[in-house]
Image: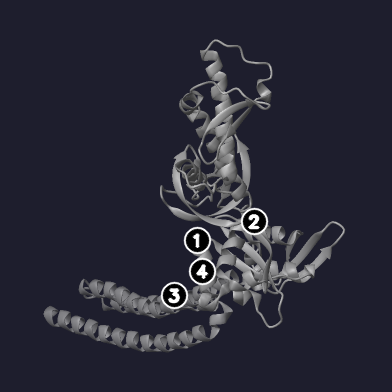
Amino acid sequence: MPIQARTEFAAAINQIASEKGVDVEVVLDAIRQAALAAYRKDLSFRNESIPDDFEELEAKLDGSTGEISIWRGETNITPPGFARIAAQTAKQVITQKLHEAEKGAIINEYEQKVGTVISGAIQRQEGNTYFVDLGRAEGLLPPPEQSRDEFYTQNQRLKFYIKEIRETSRGPEVIVSRTDPGLVKGLFAMEVPEIQSGVVEIKEIAREAGGRCKVAVVSNQDGVDPVGSMVGQKGVRVQAVINELGEEKIDIIMYSDEPKKFIASSLSPAKDVEVSLDEENKVATVRIPDAQLSLAIGKGGQNVRLAAKLTGWKIDIVGLGDTPKEEEPTHPSEGGKTTEEVAAEEEASKAKETTEVTEETKEAEVKPEETVEAPAEEVKEPEEEVTEVTEETKDTEGSTEEAKAAEESAETESTEPAVSEESAAPSESADATEGVAEESEFEKVEEEKISKEEAGEKEEEVKEVENQDSDDGK
């Protein structure tokens, strides 16, 4: 309570109490203690012994005039000129007492704010610890309370969760946090009016700071969608919280008193979940389609880990094994093949058979040409011999007959391998090879006609040569 007297001393006392945020009586008590300390010091200056009843001495202060006196019971034992001595020697004691009183008042104020969210600015850094300016007090942000993906700079303003008042070597300190789930709850309370009014309630929060957070909410009023209230129109409410947390992902789910329903919701975004409970061991077995397994487990098991924290149940996830067998790849070590590999091998075998058929047909087409050329070469040799023939025409006739026999034997030898190779072709290309065989027989007949005509021409040439020789002999 301020001093009502209108004096300079009273005004000064009131001003100090207002600036320090302490009561006036605290300031006056500090002055009284400083007066007793000054009296002890004055006795030592005068070489007087300190009385045994020093603890019983009392310092009195006039609140209106500021006059200080020392009393032993009802006797005033104030030495002459004590006010001047007290003013000089008591300054340090008064300052210390006021500082302690101020800090105590601040600690009492922030003890009432534990569990709330407050705005602050990063002031300085000592090692891995940051000091935060909270206004009247200085907060301490130790490494365990720092988010893993956040980097703090001087004068950066952030929202902090007041976690506790902790006794340190410097005295009581206000510990603030950026990783506590209470920070998420406090930020949503600032953004969602339904939480402040009690219509929507946050039941559970599971968080891994900087990564993902799951929030279970429930509505205490019919007709109010708790998830929609948390998200806001076009997601403005939840986006404001995400921006403050550094792009941390937030899953908002419906809370339920039924464990099966609550566990199925907690595994969001996975769907089609079947839950069976072992209530004795508090273990939940979740059966889920194979296509949803990755969503239910999450990156590094984060999703199922947060779901277990949120629900308080140990969760075992089992796949239904509903993936079609055709789509399941078989490991090479097992010696199996997939349907895709089998289809590829069938196509390759068909392509190989067609290439073999085309090569055989090409060989069949080429071989009759070879049979045509063979007799021609054999006929040329007797032609050269004929030029050397003398008057013995009988010998030449014998040579032509031998040439004809050689031609026929060559034709039969050249056609037989073609027919045998054609017969050895695969059963699938039988139709194609039969057509080729008929063409080769037709060509063979034509070649025989051509060879006979050539043989007749050669006989005529031989006769002409003989006639010329006979004319020359005549």
Residue type (three-letter) at the residue carrying disc 4 = Gln
Residue at 64% across, 56% down: 333
Name above or below for residue 120 compared with residue 237. Answer: above
Q: Residue at x 66, y 72 (%)?
A: 200
Identify which amino acid the numbered label 3 is placed on: Glu
Give the residue number, with chain letter if any, for mark 3. Answer: 359
Q: Rounded to the nearest whole Å, what is the CA distance between mark 2 and mark 4?
A: 50 Å
Decide: few, some or many residues near mark 2? Use Cα within 10 Å; few <14, some 14-19, many ≥20. few
Q: Earlier in the sequence, mark 1 or mark 4?
A: 4
- The crowd level at tag 4 (other Cα within 10 Å; few <14, some 14-19, many 20+) is some
Residue at the outermost front position = 75
Q: Amino acid at mark 1?
A: Glu
**Whole-percent x and y of residue 217?**
67, 69
Residue designated by label 2? 333
Q: Secondary structure at mark 3?
A: helix
Which of the pair 429/341 is nearer the observer?
341
